[in-house]
Amino acid sequence: MGTNNIVLVHGLWMTPLSWEYWAHHYTERGYCVYAPSWPGMERDVRALRREPQSYAHVGIRQIVDRYEQLVLELESPPILIGHCIGGLVVQALLDRGLGACGVAIASAPVKGVWTLPCSTLRVITPQLINPRNNHRAVPLTPAQFHYAFMHTASPEESFRMFQRYAVPGADHVLFQAELANFNPFAETTVNVRRNNRAPLLLVAGAQDHVIPPRIVRANRKLYRHSSAITEYREFADRTHFIIGQSGWQEVANYSLDWARDQELIVEREQKRIARQVRMLQDRTRQVA
C-alpha cells in the first residue's frame, strides 16, 4: 500500500495559502494533506505583511529542519511536493532519506547550478543589491509580482492574486540560494550522487520568469551520476505561479499520478527482491 500522506512546501513570497487549491483537491481524493508554514510565518497574510520581521532571519536549514520534524512524526513517509524554495527543500529532505518520493515544482536550484537567465536576474537583483543589510523581509510591488509570477495574466487578475497570496520574502533565504556556489558551506548543498534516495520529479513552467526551464534542466543534470530516479516534466504556457494559475489541476494530477507510479514501481521491486530471497532460502534448505 502506498502512503496516504502528502506534505506541501510553499515558496518565497508566499505562504501555505498558495497551496489552497491543491490541498482541497488532494483532500477530496482521500489524502491527509499537511501544508505547514516556514518558521516564523505561522500567521495569516495580512499579519505577515504588517510584521514580516518574525521570519526575516530564517535560513534554508531551519526551513528544512521544520519539515523534517513534521515528516518524522507521520506514520508513513509522505509524498513531498514543493514550489520554488519549497522545491529546494524537497530535494534536501530526499537527500536526508525522507519521503516516499518528491516533486519539485519551479524549484530553486541546489548548489552547483550556475545558470542565471536575465529574467531571473530581473526578479532577484533588486533584493540582492539593496544597500541596506540583509536579514530583511522584502515585499514585491504589484508590478514585480506580475512580472515574476503571472505575466501571462491580465494586470487585474495578477493584482487579485497579489492581494490574496503575496507576502514579503526573507532575503536571507534568497541570498543563500542565489549565492550558494560562492559558499563552501552552502545550506543548499545536496548529495546529487546519492543512489538510495526516493524518486524525484522536477517540474518546470515554459513561461516561468523566476525559474525558467533551463534552470530546472540544469538542476536535473546534476543528478546524472545517480542511479536514483530523477525525471523532468515541462508544462507549456505556465508561469512561476504554476500551482495557482488557470490549469493548475493538470499539474496537480500529473504530480500525484507520477508519485503513485513510483510507489508501485518500488513496491514491485520490493516484492521481487523478497521472492528472490525466499527462493535463495529454499535452495539453501534443500542443499542442507
Image (cartoon, rainbow, N blue to C red):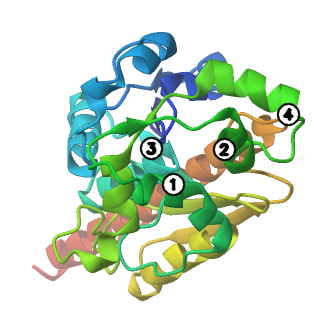
Where residue 184 appears, as percent x and y from the top left, is: 18, 77
Residue in the picture at 45% in, 78% down:
113
**Closer to the camera, 251 or 110?**
110
Q: Decide if residue 240 is in sight here.
A: no
Residue 108 in view: yes
Question: Does label 1 or label 3 sit earlier along the sequence?
Answer: 3
Disc 1, disc 2: CB below 8 Å?
A: yes
User: Residue visible at 48% across and 41% down?
Assistant: 11
Amino acid type of the residue that numbered disc 1 sits on in the rendered structure: Pro
Identify residue type, mark 2: Gln
Badge number at residue 80: 3
Q: Which of marks 2 and 4 is nearer the N terminus?
A: 2
Query: Which mark is on residue 145?
Result: none
| Kind of residue at badge 4 | Pro
Dot 1 and dot 4 residues touching (CB under 8 Å): no
Q: Quadrant of the C terminus?
A: bottom left
State which quadrant residue 214 falls in: bottom right
Measuring from the top left, give residue 287's x and y in whole percent. Answer: 16, 82
Q: Which residue lies furthest to the front in this view?
A: 131
Q: Please give the residue where the numbered disc 2 appears in the rendered image.
A: 144
Closest to the camera, between mark 3 and mark 2, is 2
Corner quadrant of residue 140:
top right
Q: Name the residue under label 1.
A: 126
Q: Nearer the viewer, mark 1 or mark 4?
A: 1
Judging depth in this view, the residue of 87 and 120 nearest the camera is: 120
Q: Mark 4 points at which residue?
A: 155
Mark 2, secondary structure of its residue: helix
Q: How crowded is mark 1: few (under 14 residues within 10 Å), some or many (20 or more)?
A: few
